Image (cartoon, rainbow, N blue to C red):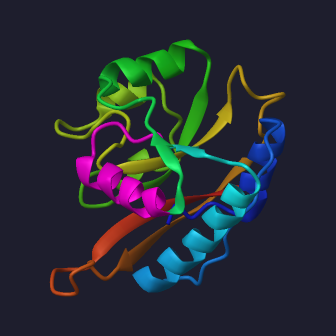
């Protein structure tokens, strides 16, 4: 959904010095396909001794419930360390700690093309329209974190092409949903 190249994800994980794996999904999986593949992957992790899964969700109650409902039957406890934190304070803390992220996807109904490809900083936050969460918690935008105190070094990249794509709304009745993506080149 974020339009991030696999190479960038791998590079990021290596520079964070964390083990990682991926779950391969088709381009537009059905919920059944998604649920089946994720349950299989979680079961494998559970068999390796993993007991908890952490999420960065802040206040979307339906998403939290979904995650808990999916993982509880598999015996995995959900942890939400940012839950109910003030998003303005969180983004300011993120910046003050020395983290840097670039916006790689925006919801075109909420933000214009000028926001995609921008680095999250005070100027970015000040330019957000009223009603847009500064952490993008409502799906307004998605980012790629490339620098910060937990990285062994900066994740180098260059900014590539910006493209617009539309997807059918989840109910199939409403208008299509448009997104701008910014390609990051390794």
Which residue occupies the foreground of this view, 129 or 63? 63
Q: Is residue 59 left or right of residue 20?
A: left
Residue 92 shows in this picture: yes
* Residue shown at the point (50%, 61%) measured from the top left: 181
Relative to 83, 97 lies left or right: right
84 versus 139 height, above or below: above
Where is the C terminus found, in terms of image quarters? Answer: bottom right
Pick the residue in front: 19 or 185. Answer: 19
For the point 40% across and 22% down, the residue is 90
**Residue 142 pos. (x, y %):** 46, 49
> Front-most of 186 and 9?
9
User: Which x, y percent locates residue 141?
Assistant: 40, 49
Image location of residue 80, percent across then percent down: 43, 36
Tell me the quarter of the picture where residue 146 sits. Answer: top right
Residue drawn where x is 53% and y is 62% of the image:
74
Q: Residue furthest top?
A: 96
Work out whether residue 129 or residue 143 is closer to the camera in this orientation and state it: 143
Identify which residue is drawn at 41% across, 56% down. Answer: 67
- Report x, y in % for residue 111: 30, 51
Indicate left or right for 67 with 50 as reference: left
Q: Main secondary structure of the magenta part?
A: helix
Q: Decide whether residue 1 is among the magenta residues.
A: no
Q: Which residues are magenta?
A: 56-73
Please indicate, yes or no, whether residue 186 appears anywhere in the rendered image.
Answer: no
Q: Is residue 160 left or right of residue 113?
A: right
Q: How many marks?
A: 0
């Amino acid at each position: 959904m974020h339009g991030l190249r696999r190479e960038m994800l791998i590079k990021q994980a290596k520079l964070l010095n964390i083990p990682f794996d991926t779950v391969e999904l088709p381009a537009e999986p059905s919920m059944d396909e998604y649920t089946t593949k994720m349950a299989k992957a979680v079961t494998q992790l559970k068999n390796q001794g993993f007991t908890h899964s952490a999420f960065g969700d802040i206040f979307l109650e339906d998403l939290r419930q979904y995650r808990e409902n999916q993982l509880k039957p598999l015996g995995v406890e959900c942890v939400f360390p940012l839950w109910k934190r003030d998003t303005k304070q969180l983004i300011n803390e993120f910046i003050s700690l020395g983290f840097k992220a670039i916006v790689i996807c925006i919801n075109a109904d909420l933000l214009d093309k000028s926001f995609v490809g921008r680095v999250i900083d005070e100027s970015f936050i000040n330019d957000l329209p009223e009603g847009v969460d500064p952490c993008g918690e409502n799906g307004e935008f998605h980012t790629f974190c490339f620098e910060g105190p937990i990285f062994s070094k900066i994740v180098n990249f260059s900014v590539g092409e910006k493209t617009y794509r539309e997807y059918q709304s989840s109910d199939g009745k409403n208008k299509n949903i448009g997104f701008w993506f910014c390609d990051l080149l390794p």
